[in-house]
Amino acid sequence: MKDLGLYLHIPFCASKCAYCDFYSLPSSDLHERYVDSLCKSIEMISKRHKDALFTSIYVGGGTPSILDSALINKLLCSISENLSVSDDAELTMEANPATLSKEKLSVMRKGGVNRISLGCQSVHENELKRISRIHSFEDFCESFALSRNAGFDNISVDLMYGLPEQTLSSLLLSVDKISDLSPDHISLYGLRVEPDTPLGRDRHLVLPDEDIQCEMYSRACDLLRTKGYLRYEISNFAKDGKFSRHNMRYWEGKEYIGLGAAAHSYLDGVRYAYERDAAKYIRSLEDGELPLPCESSKIEKSDLLEEFIILSMRLEKGLDLSVLSEKFGSDAKSKLLERVRPYIPKFVKEKDGHISFTTEGFLVSSTILSELI
Ligand code: SF4
């Protein structure tokens, strides 16, 4: 059977965070029709991919936990009734603390969800307000406890650095308090100010300067290490090997199907995406068709090599030089080794047949990568 991943996009949020440019609608009366459309899409792909075995499923958004219990149940039933899902599959659902309840968590557990990803971003109320998060740290702690009590033994928490009003010590306190709760996985993302967002349009925006942001990242990595979290990807840290198997699929260039407005897929050497338009997605499924992708591109061999370098170098284990030779020939390996030489040992390590970034290298990874590809 063919090993595949599935991504389902839920494009609804209670309100829009100031930094976010993901496709999500701040309020909507489309929940039920959208979930029905996703269920129809799942039925359709089950017929098209009869030989598929899904080993990772990720329900992301938006805010999947904004759906009511009955809709969450409908969506999860559609997955289990239509798709072959491996016994040990990872099934993650993203949740925003202000939208979780005991009842929803119980429906998720019964429906096969075995990993919850909770957005926290910061433990400080001023920082949360500044980026328009709708929850407090207290709400987060409550949701975290509810999730553990519901039986989730794999919880991931998102944190951010480089936020307005954030200082090095406030970030370290966030990392400290979150790791004290002992989630199984922590993601730590640097804020990216996208132009078409309230933060991007804020002419008075003041952010920690670049040097402070570098220090924030490296000190947070050190703290996470002392708290038992292994960095396995530039922004991701796990305890007891609980890596995000679905995200590993993206970084290892494996195939997945994305369903829903704005969802991306990678299948049979082609990357494609659906339009950022939930109403259009619904109309198409109500007419009995999956929408046509709004973008689609066949990945050429040269693009595959670039992707392989960029994605492998995000990982702590780095790029496996023997796999590089096997897939792209020994010339590709010699060229890469020649280009990477000036960055060894300060920014790049070469060890056990792999090349990988040091912490200092991760801080300037995009500059170095542009020289490597
Ligand atoms: S909850 Fe997540 S998806 Fe929704 S607006 Fe905030 S960051 Fe974006």
Image (cartoon, rainbow, N blue to C red):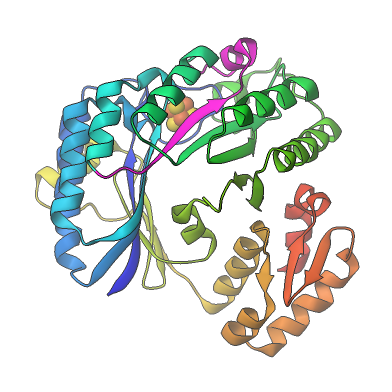
Residue 248 placement (x, y as % from top left) = 51, 58
Position of 290 compared to 201: left or right?
Answer: left
Give the residues in magenta.
Answer: 112-134
Residue 163 placement (x, y as % from top left) = 68, 24
Residue 211 placement (x, y as % from top left) = 86, 34
Asked which quadrant contains residue 372, the reply is bottom right
Position of 178 compared to 370: left or right?
Answer: left
Residue 251 placement (x, y as % from top left) = 54, 60
Farthest residue, direction bottom: 330
Does the magenta-highlighted stretch encompass residue 3? no
Asked which quadrant contains residue 269, the reply is bottom left
User: Measuring 72% from the left and 43% from the top, which residue is drawn there?
Assistant: 225
Q: Is residue 204 above or below residue 208?
A: above
Pick whichever, 314 or 175, lies toward us: 175
Quarter in which the C terminus is drawn: bottom right
Pick whichever, 22 or 186, lies toward us: 186
User: Measuring 67% from the left and 69% from the top, which residue is drawn there?
Assistant: 319
Q: Is residue 38 above or below residue 13?
A: below
Quarter in which the N terminus is drawn: bottom left
Please count the marks in the image. 0
Q: Is residue 41 visible?
A: no
Asked which quadrant contains residue 296, the reply is bottom left
User: Measuring 14% from the left and 64% from the top, which residue is drawn there?
Assistant: 47
Farthest residue, direction left: 287
Position of 219 compared to 146: left or right?
Answer: right
Q: Is residue 279 visible?
A: yes
Does the magenta-highlighted stretch encompass residue 133? yes
Q: In this view, does 151 lie above or below 264?
A: above
User: Measuring 79% from the left and 21% from the top, which residue is drawn there?
Assistant: 169
